[in-house]
C-alpha cells in the first residue's frame, strides 16, 4: 500500500538511493477536509429537505382540513366531495405495530438471551447469522409469502377456531376470518422486526461485563438467576432502546403490511377486531399513490400522511438512539472497567 | 534464564493429622488451549490465611477460580483434578456447582457490586437467592456482614444508596460483605487490594486478620509484603507449577528453591 | 461481628430450594431455546416456499422477455424488471457510495467534535428510517419538479437509503485501523489527506467493501421508495427519463394479479431476488467473519507473548 506513495527513486552518487515520496500539498489538505465535512453535512441537508418538501407538498391538505387532517376519519377522493382524515391510519399503524411488538419483544429477548448467555460457542455465530439473514429477506418477499402461504394457515388454524369459539359477540375476534387482516399483518410484521430487536439486545447483553455475572454465580446463582440479577438490570435501558428501535421499524414497514392488511379506507379502517382489514400510514401511501392525480388534494393528503409518518418515526428513532447510546457510554465510563 | 521451573519435590511441613478444610488434588486447567495450571496439589487449613504468590500469568488466579468451579465459566476452559471441601468432591457429577459455590465465597480483583442495587440489596441479594425472606434476619445479616467488612460505620445512614456511589475501596469492602452474607465456609480473594490505595488496602488487610479467626481464607496476591503481612502459609507458583509451598516465614526467609528465592528477593516478577 | 453461633442460626434460614431453582432454570432455558426455534421456522419456511415455487418459473425466456398482456396466454417474462434493478443499483451506488465513504471519513477522522456527533446521530436515525417516506420526499423533490418518473429519481431515493449504512460501516472500519499507521505516515511528512486516502483506506478495505455490499443487498430488495419514483413499467428502458421497472416492484404487482401464471412468476421473481440478497449477505459475512477471526487470533497471540 505504500508503493503508491513513492513517486520516484533517485540514485545518488555514492551508490545509495533516495526515495522521493508523494506527500501532497497543504491546499489539498484543506480541500479534502471540506469535502469530507460537506459529505457529512449532506445528511443534515437531507433531513432538512425531507421536512421542507413534505411540508410544502402537503400544504394544500393542511390548509383545507387543518387539524382535522389528524383527527378526521373521512377518506373520500371523489371530486367535489373530497375530504381527508388520517386518524384511522394512525390508529391502524399503532395497533398493528403494537400487536407485532407484543409478539416479537418476548421472542427477541429470548433469542438474545440464548445467544449471549446459553448458546454453546459452536452454535453462537451461525445462529446469530441466521437471525441476521431474517433481516436481510426483502419486505416484498415476506409479503408474497404471507399473502400466498402464511395467510391460509392463519385463517384455517388460528382465526377460524378462535372465531368459532368466541363468535361475533367478542369484539376482538369479531368479523369473518379472511386471512387478510390485522392479525396476519402483525404476525408477519413481528417476524420481520425480531432480528432488529434480537441482535441489538444481544449486543447490549454481551456488553454487560463478565465480572457482574461472576458476582452472581459466586452467590450460588443458576444461569437464569445470574441473568436476572446481573445482566437484566444492567442492560435495562439499552433493552428499552432496542425495543423502541424495533417499534420504529414496525411503524415504517410498508410492503409486507400493504400486501397483508386488507386495505380499507376511512372509518372502517379504525381497528376494533383482530380479524378486520385495516390500513396503516405506510400502506395507504403505497396503495393509493397510483390513483392520485398530480397537483390534486388527494396527492397532498398522501404526502401529508408521509409527513405524519416521518414525525412519528423520527421521534421514535431519536428516543431509541439516545437510550442505546447512553448505555454504550455508561459502559465505557463505568467504574467497573 | 528461567524458561522452565525446575521441579522440586514439595515438602509441606504440616503434620498429617491436621484436618484440612479444602484440598486440591492434581488440578490442571487450561483455556483456549493454553495450559495455565499444571498438576497442582495443595491443602488449605481451616482458620488460616494461605497466600498464592507468583509473577503475573503464573496461573494463580486460574487455580483460585478452580476452587469454586468459577473457572469452567470461562470461555473454552478445561479442567482435570479434584477439589475436596470437607472431604466431598466439588467436581463430582452428582453435585450441581451452585450448591458449593455458596459455601465458597469469592472476592474479585476489581470491585464488582451490582450497580443498579442499593447497598442493602447488594448484601442481601445472595440471601434472597437462598430463600431467606425474614426481614429481621436479612437486617441482622446485612448489618453483621457490613460490620465484618468494616464498612458499617461509613454506610449505616444510607443503606438505600446505590452501591456504585461508594468509593473504590468501599465498593471492594461491599463486595466482601456480599460474599460473607451467604455464610460461606471458605473465602477466596483474588488480589482484593490491587486496585486500591494504601489506606483502603490496610483496612482490607486488617479485616482479613479479623476474618481469619473463623474462615479458611485463600488470597492471591503479587504484592509480597502483603503476603508476609496477612498470610500463615504461602504457595509460590511459576509458569503454572506450584514451585514451593510452606509456612510464610519459611518461604520468605529460607526458601528451598532457587526460583522462589529469586522471586521473593525481587529479582524478577 | 457475627459469632459462629449466629452464623449457624443464619444458615438455618437458608431454604433447601436448590432443586426448585434448578428446575426453574431448566424451564427458562427450554423457553429461550424455543424462542430461537420459533424465529428460525419462518426463515426456513420462506426459503423452502420460494425455492420450490420459484425454481419452476426459471427459464431463459422468463429472465429476458417483457411481460405479456395481463391475463393473456403468454405470461412473458420479467426482463425489464431485472434490467431496471441492475441499472438502479449501479446508479444509486454511484451516487451513494462516494458521499457515504467521504461522510464516513469525516466521522472517523474529523468528526470527534459536537458537529461530528450530531451528524453521527442523524445518520443513525436515518439508517432506521421508513424508506417509504424517502420515496415520497424524492417524489416531491424530483418527480414533481421534473414532471416525470425516472431511473434518476429511483436511484436518488435508493442512494439515500444506502448512504447511512455505507457511512457507518466506513467510519467503523476506519476506526479499526491502528493510530500507529497514521503516525507512521505523518512521520514521513505525508499530508493528512494522502495518509487517509492511501494508508488508512487501504487498511480498512475489507470493512468498506463489506459495508458497500451489504447496502447494495439492502437496496436490491427495497420496494416502497420505488413506487413513488420509477412507478413500474412493462418495457425495457428506452430513454433517460420515463418510468422503468424493478424486481421488487414487479413481484408486488404480480402478487396482486388473480392468475396462476402471475403467481408463479411472482415466486420466480422472489427466487431471483432472494438468491441475490442472501448470497451477498452470506458471502460477505463468511469472508468478513473469517478475517475478523484471523485478526482476533493474531492480536490474542501477540497479547500473550508480551
Image (cartoon, grey):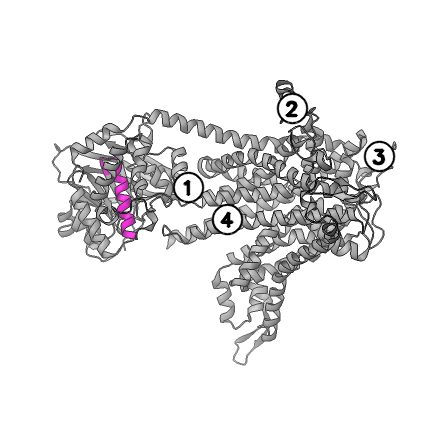
Q: Residue at x 50, y 49 (%)?
A: A323
- Picture coordinates of residue A83 (x, y %)? 76, 43
How far apart marks 3 and 4 lie (CA) works out to 50 Å
- Picture coordinates of residue A298 (x, y %)? 78, 46
Q: Which residue is mark 4?
A: A324
Please identify the residue farthest to the top as the structure is shown.
A165
Q: Write down the region rendered in magenta.
A: B168-186
Disc 1 and disc 3 in contact, CB within 8 angstroms: no
Please identify the residue farthest to the bottom as the structure is shown.
A13
Q: Is residue C268 left or right of residue A252?
A: right
Q: Is residue B145 above or below residue B130?
A: below
Q: Which residue is mark 2?
A: A159
Disc 1 and disc 2 in contact, CB within 8 angstroms: no
Whichever of callouts 1 and 2 sits on the residue coming sooner in the sequence is 2
Density class for disc 1 (Cα within 10 Å; few <14, some 14-19, many ≥20) is: some
Density class for disc 3 (Cα within 10 Å; few <14, some 14-19, many ≥20) is: many
How far apart marks 4 and 1 lie (CA) works out to 15 Å
Density class for disc 2 (Cα within 10 Å; few <14, some 14-19, many ≥20) is: many
Q: Quadrant of residue A157?
A: top right
Q: Residue at x 22, y 42 (%)?
A: B218
Q: Residue at x 83, y 50 (%)?
A: C237
In magenta stretch: residue B180: yes
Q: Is residue B218 above or below residue B254?
A: above
Q: Chain of mark 2?
A: A
How far apart marks 1 and 2 lie (CA) works out to 38 Å
- Picture coordinates of residue C82 (x, y %)? 77, 44
| Camera-side mark, 3 or 4 | 4
Q: Which residue is mark 1?
A: A233
Q: Are discs 1 and 2 both within one chain? A: yes
Amino acid at each position: 500500500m505504500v508503493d503508491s506513495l513513492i513517486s520516484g527513486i533517485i540514485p545518488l552518487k555514492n551508490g545509495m538511493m533516495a526515495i522521493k515520496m508523494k506527500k501532497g500539498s497543504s491546499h489539498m489538505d484543506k480541500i479534502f477536509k471540506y469535502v469530507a465535512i460537506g459529505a457529512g453535512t449532506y445528511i443534515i441537508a437531507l433531513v432538512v429537505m425531507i421536512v421542507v418538501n413534505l411540508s410544502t407538498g402537503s400544504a394544500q391538505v393542511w390548509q383545507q382540513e387543518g387539524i382535522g387532517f389528524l383527527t378526521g376519519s373521512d377518506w373520500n377522493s371523489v371530486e367535489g366531495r373530497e375530504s381527508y382524515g388520517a386518524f384511522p391510519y394512525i390508529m391502524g399503524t399503532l395497533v398493528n405495530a403494537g400487536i407485532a411488538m407484543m409478539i416479537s419483544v418476548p421472542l427477541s429477548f429470548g433469542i438474545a438471551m440464548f445467544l449471549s448467555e446459553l448458546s454453546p460457542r459452536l452454535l453462537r455465530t451461525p445462529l446469530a447469522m441466521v437471525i441476521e439473514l431474517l433481516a436481510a429477506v426483502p419486505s416484498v418477499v415476506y409479503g408474497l409469502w404471507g399473502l400466498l402461504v402464511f395467510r391460509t394457515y392463519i385463517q384455517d388454524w388460528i382465526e377460524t377456531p378462535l372465531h368459532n369459539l368466541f363468535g361475533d359477540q367478542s369484539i376482538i375476534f369479531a368479523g369473518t376470518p379472511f386471512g387478510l387482516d390485522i392479525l396476519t399483518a402483525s404476525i408477519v410484521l413481528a417476524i420481520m422486526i425480531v432480528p432488529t430487536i434480537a441482535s441489538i439486545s444481544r449486543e447490549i447483553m454481551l456488553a454487560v461485563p463478565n465480572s457482574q455475572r461472576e458476582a452472581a454465580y459466586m452467590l450460588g446463582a443458576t444461569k437464569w438467576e445470574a441473568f436476572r440479577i446481573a445482566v437484566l438490570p444492567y442492560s435495562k435501558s439499552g433493552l428499552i432502546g432496542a425495543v423502541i428501535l424495533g417499534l420504529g421499524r414496525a411503524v415504517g414497514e410498508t410492503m409486507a403490511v400493504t400486501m397483508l392488511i386488507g386495505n380499507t379506507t376511512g372509518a372502517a379502517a379504525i381497528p376494533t377486531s383482530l380479524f378486520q382489514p385495516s390500513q396503516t400510514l405506510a400502506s395507504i401511501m403505497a396503495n393509493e399513490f397510483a390513483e392520485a392525480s398530480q397537483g390534486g388534494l388527494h396527492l397532498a393528503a398522501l404526502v401529508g400522511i408521509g409527513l405524519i409518518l416521518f414525525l412519528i418515526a423520527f421521534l421514535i428513532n431519536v428516543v431509541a438512539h439516545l437510550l442505546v447510546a447512553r448505555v454504550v457510554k455508561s459502559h465505557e465510563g463505568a467504574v467497573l472497567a | 534464564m528461567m524458561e522452565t521451573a525446575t521441579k522440586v519435590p514439595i515438602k509441606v511441613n504440616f503434620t498429617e493429622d491436621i484436618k484440612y478444610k479444602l484440598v486440591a488434588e492434581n488440578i490442571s486447567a487450561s483455556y483456549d488451549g493454553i495450559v495455565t495450571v499444571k498438576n497442582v496439589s495443595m491443602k488449605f487449613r481451616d482458620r488460616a490465611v494461605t497466600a498464592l504468590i507468583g509473577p503475573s500469568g503464573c496461573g494463580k488466579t486460574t487455580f483460585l477460580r478452580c476452587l469454586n468451579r468459577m473457572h469452567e465459566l470461562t470461555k473454552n476452559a478445561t479442567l482435570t483434578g479434584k477439589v475436596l471441601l470437607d472431604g466431598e468432591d466439588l467436581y463430582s457429577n452428582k453435585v450441581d456447582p451452585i450448591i458449593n459455590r455458596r459455601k465458597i465465597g469469592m472476592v474479585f480483583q476489581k470491585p464488582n457490586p451490582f450497580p443498579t442495587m442499593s447497598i442493602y440489596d447488594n448484601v442481601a441479594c445472595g440471601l434472597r437467592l437462598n430463600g431467606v425472606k425474614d426481614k429481621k434476619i436479612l437486617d441482622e445479616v446485612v448489618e453483621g456482614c457490613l460490620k465484618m467488612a468494616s464498612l458499617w460505620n461509613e454506610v449505616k445512614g444510607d443503606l438505600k444508596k446505590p452501591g456504585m456511589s461508594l468509593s473504590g475501596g468501599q465498593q471492594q469492602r461491599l463486595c466482601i460483605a456480599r460474599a460473607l452474607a451467604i455464610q460461606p465456609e471458605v473465602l477466596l480473594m483474588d488480589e482484593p487490594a490491587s486496585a486500591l490505595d494504601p489506606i483502603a488496602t490496610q483496612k482490607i488487610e486488617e479485616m482479613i486478620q479479623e476474618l481469619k479467626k473463623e474462615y479458611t481464607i485463600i488470597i492471591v496476591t503479587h504484592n509480597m509484603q502483603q503476603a508476609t503481612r496477612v498470610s500463615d502459609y504461602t504457595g509460590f507458583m511459576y509458569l503454572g507449577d506450584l514451585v514451593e509451598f510452606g509456612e510464610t516465614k519459611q518461604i520468605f526467609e529460607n526458601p528451598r528453591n532457587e526460583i522462589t528465592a529469586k522471586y521473593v528477593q525481587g529479582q524478577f516478577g | 461481628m457475627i459469632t459462629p453461633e449466629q452464623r449457624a442460626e443464619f444458615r438455618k434460614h437458608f431454604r433447601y430450594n436448590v432443586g426448585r431453582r434448578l428446575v426453574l432454570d431448566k424451564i427458562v432455558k427450554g423457553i429461550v431455546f424455543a424462542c430461537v426455534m420459533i424465529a428460525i421456522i419462518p426463515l426456513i419456511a420462506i426459503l423452502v416456499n420460494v425455492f420450490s415455487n420459484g425454481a419452476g418459473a426459471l427459464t431463459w425466456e422468463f429472465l429476458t422477455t417483457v411481460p405479456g398482456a395481463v391475463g393473456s396466454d403468454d405470461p412473458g417474462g420479467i426482463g425489464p424488471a431485472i434490467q431496471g434493478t441492475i441499472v438502479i443499483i449501479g446508479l444509486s451506488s454511484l451516487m451513494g457510495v462516494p458521499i457515504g465513504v467521504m461522510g464516513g471519513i469525516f466521522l472517523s477522522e474529523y468528526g470527534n467534535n459536537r458537529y461530528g456527533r450530531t451528524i453521527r446521530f442523524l445518520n443513525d436515525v436515518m439508517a432506521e428510517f421508513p424508506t417509504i417516506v424517502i420515496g415520497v420526499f424524492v417524489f416531491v423533490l424530483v418527480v414533481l419538479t421534473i414532471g416525470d418518473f425516472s431511473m434518476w429519481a429511483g436511484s436518488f431515493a435508493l442512494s439515500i437509503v444506502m448512504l447511512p449504512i455505507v457511512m457507518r460501516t466506513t467510519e467503523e472500519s476506519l476506526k479499526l485501523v491502528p493510530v500507529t499507521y497514521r503516525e507512521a505516515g505523518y512521520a514521513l511528512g505525508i499530508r493528512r489527506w494522502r495518509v487517509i486516502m492511501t494508508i488508512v483506506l487501504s487498511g480498512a478495505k475489507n470493512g468498506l467493501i463489506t459495508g458497500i455490499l451489504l447496502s447494495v443487498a439492502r437496496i436490491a430488495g427495497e420496494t416502497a421508495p420505488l413506487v413513488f419514483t420509477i412507478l413500474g413499467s412493462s418495457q425495457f428502458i428506452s430513454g433517460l427519463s420515463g418510468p422503468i421497472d424493478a424486481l421488487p416492484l414487479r413481484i408486488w404487482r404480480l402478487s396482486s394479479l388473480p392468475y396462476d401464471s402471475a403467481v408463479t412468476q411472482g415466486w420466480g421473481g422472489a427466487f431471483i431476488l432472494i438468491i441475490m440478497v442472501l448470497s451477498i449477505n452470506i458471502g460477505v459475512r463468511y469472508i468478513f467473519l473469517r478475517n475478523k477471526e484471523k485478526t482476533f487470533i493474531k492480536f490474542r497471540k501477540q497479547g500473550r507473548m508480551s
